[in-house]
Amino acid sequence: MSKEPAAPPSTPPDAPPALELRGIDKRFGAVHANRAITFAVAAGSIHGLIGENGAGKSTLMNIVYGFHRADAGKIRVQGRAVEIGSPQQAIAAGIGMVHQHFMLVENFTVLENVVLGVEGGALLAGALAAARAELGRLARDYGLEVPLDAVVSELSVGLQQRVEILKALYRGAEVLILDEPTAVLTPHEADQLFVMLRRLRAQGKAVILVTHKLREIMAVTDRVTVMKQGAVVAEVATRETSPRGLAEHMVGRAVLLQVEKRPAQPGAELLSVKALEVRDRLGVARLKSVSFNLRAGEIVGIAGVAGNGQSELLEVLAGTRAASRGEISFGGRDLVREQLDPRARRALGLAHVPEDRLRMGVVAGFSAADNAILGYHDAARFNRGGLRDEAAIRAACAAKMAEFDVRPPQPELRLAAFSGGNQQKLVLAREIDADPQVLLIGQPTRGVDIGAIEFIHKRLIALRDAGKALLLVSVELDEILALADRILVMNGGEIIGELARADATEEKIGLMMAGVRAEASP
Amino acid sequence: MSAPAKLPRWAELGLLPLINLGVALVVAGVIIKILGESPLAAFKLMATGALGTQEGIGYTLYYATNFIFTGLAVAVAYHAGLFNIGAEGQAYIGGLGTGLVCLYLGAWPFWVVLPLAVLAGAIFGAMWAFIPAWLQARRGSHIVITTIMFNFIAAALMTYLLVNVLIKPGQQSPETREFSANAVMPAAHELLAKMGITVVATPLNLAFGLALVAAVGVWIFIWRTRWGFALRVAGANSAAAVYAGISPPRIIVGAMLISGALAGGLGLNELMGSQHRILMDFPSGAGFVGIAVALMGRNHPVGIVVAAVLFGALYQGGSQLSFDMPKINRDMVVVIQGLVILLCGAMENVFRAPLTALFARVRSGKGIE
Ligand SMILES: Nc1ncnc2c1ncn2[C@@H]1O[C@H](COP(=O)(O)OP(=O)(O)OP(=O)(O)O)[C@@H](O)[C@H]1O
Ligand SMILES: [Mg+2]
């Protein structure tokens, strides 16, 4: 190597950066996803990467990991120029990536998953024994304890993610990329992840963390790079910045981190649930005698540690899961007894934004326009004389895209070609625009940028003010406190207490989430 | 999200099938060479045999008619996420329905018999697809396995019926009597003669037109109706289907009924159009060729029609070949056809990855300049 380019400020002058990108450029048709990006990450540091939805973060990371090929630009790892055309080459160069949708074989054990693809011989036994020893060492060094013989499908999301990190480290990753790793984690799991990332940093690894949560950026990163419309617009040391400053870099204007709202004016009861019970396939009760009601003009938030029945509650109300007992009255009907399917419930005015939107809320291979009518495809406004009204479908999608700022605003584009956050926004647009009487909404701002969070919160409050009822499930306590007028706390499949917003504090909710019942208030 | 690079549309739909076909021909050429004939001469013979004469074209389109019906059948199931291997059996039983109408209602005027024959073929074919569909929807029995088994059951059932029940009395071969003149599909040369155009007589008949109508119908159904939309959603993501209020079991049954009904169209061409009676094994593999046709045609009606004509040409050209080149017998022709099916159908993805990489390289090369 003859002459080294001047090292970026974060790197000690003697050591080359663990990963260095120079002039990375990438277009998808008309979309310029990455514009001459230059970016460096020092070994032994955690580098945050933030930016609006569609700014090009995932594209850049996918280029580094060999999923996409850059149109132009150079990648250097530890000062060496490398050619990365496939994930195999990225791994060989010492780059590992944890995907948001895990790439694990569900019915293999943890050990088998880690060894998969690097068995290094015809007989498995030797590889497994060697891997077991090596993983023991990794677990000790980085605090990555995982039950090696457990089947992956039985692990929690947080543990599955840990398996992904182990996989990358086992393959010798020196640079670890995590694209929105906390979007699927509970706050507690996220904290555990950060403990691990700090250990990785202490051991000299370079970590790139893509996230929309500025709190996380402030908590764990050393430096932050901000992207906007495909270009890097700022790079700063974390301790010299603030969430507000970062938000302005990202969006280009001041962002309301908390939306204003008037006190609720609850009206008539719109939906009521009595003694609702749900059992899973093994007969275990997931919901135990849940009763509550929703009134016009209020937002009811469901708080609880993930896995305490919130997801099941949303699903059984939406009709994607069957109740084993109880009653759901809505629009003068008993949804449980009549076994109404999700379509019939939608027709009555019950809309549902599912928690895992990218899995069950969209069809990735279909156009945005088709996705924008999913669930409403039978509606008269999208059909004419037995055929789909293509013009109306396209126009409706274009209107939603304009309103919710879904980019690029092209109804014909395949959904998979949109950035993660823009896919999320389209689903929210579809369900909010349907103008339902009751909106069930799980993790409304998962994966969307802070500008969009502000907008979505405003829209949800407007829906409330228009006399609709909203049931909100979110792992973000902040979000529940920001939006809800009334808070129900779930624990072990039960509602163990209710708080008016005015009485709710993080401490009170936290105690109830842990299973401490609220004493009857006077 | 992190989808690997895609091919441009023209390469996906045009170039890739051509490469597959080209490789199939090269391999076939090597075999022909080993047999001691000139590959070029053989291919020329096949091409002129299939497309160089009126007779060749007639036969080519006649074979293509069968493949359009079965190809559409496979495609509709495919869009619902189902691999229907049973078009062969569905066509066989569907043909029974058409044949029974022709045999027993053949005294009625043709324009009455025709819709009844179409309907009977569709219903019988659909019925044969219904049982595997129901087993998949309600019991989770895999449709690939059950449809294969139903091909065998169909063959056994038809053998029984033809040998013991429907056989023309006082005859050795297991066939029915001939359909009456009212129950025969007008041949293309007769129809054209009415318009003052004289062409050589071939088995090509009105069923070809019906197949094209079916192709248009499938296109409208799949891409322009809400039912087709629901079917595609269920095929692409069943969790999203449930969320959207689309019942996957219902879609499985509905899609297979349509698929079986389309396969049942084969009897219109083969029995009503050409054989004019019910006989043993009249689908003669068209159900399986339909799988290759659907794959090669990317499960799109236009692609299916094009692929069906190609396979029709291969069949017609192949029989010409076995006729004119003594060293290449009928079995060799089947081997060559099998190669095309293998490379264009089953192995159609083999050349995709290298081609995609090539395109990516060419494009990034441009980007750097
Ligand atoms: N495979 C693709 N085909 C076409 N366009 C694409 C493709 N992948 C990404 N894009 C476009 O590139 C741009 C950048 O997308 P990218 O996924 O990198 O954004 P992001 O910063 O990760 O956003 P988010 O925060 O929403 O995840 C978007 O406009 C997107 O539509
Ligand atoms: Mg992204």
Image (tube, rainbow, N blue to C red):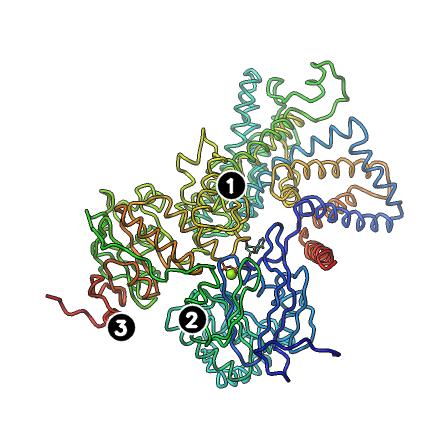
Would residue B81 be visible to someone looking at this image? no
Of residue A396 and residue B109, the one placed in the foreground of this image is: A396
Q: Earlier in the sequence, mark 3 or mark 2?
A: 2
B270 or A335: nearer the eye?
A335
Q: Which residue is mark 1?
A: B129
Q: Give the chain letter at badge 2.
A: A
Q: Nearer the viewer, mark 3 or mark 2?
A: 2
Q: Residue at horizontal 59%, vertical 52%?
A: A31
Q: Is mark 3 within 8 Å of ligand 1?
A: no
Judging from the image, mark 1 belongs to the subunit labelled B
Tell if the residue under mark 3 belongs to the same chain as the one under mark 1.
no
Residue annotated with mark 3: A514
How packed is label 1: few (under 14 Cα within 10 Å), some, or many (20 or more)? many
- Give the amino acid type for the residue marked by disc 1 in the picture: Ala
As drawn, the label of residue A405 is none
Left or right, A28 with reference to A498: right
Q: Name which residue lies at 53% across and 67% down.
A: A234
Residue kind at label 3, given as amino acid type: Ala
**Disc nearest the viewer among 2 and 1:** 2
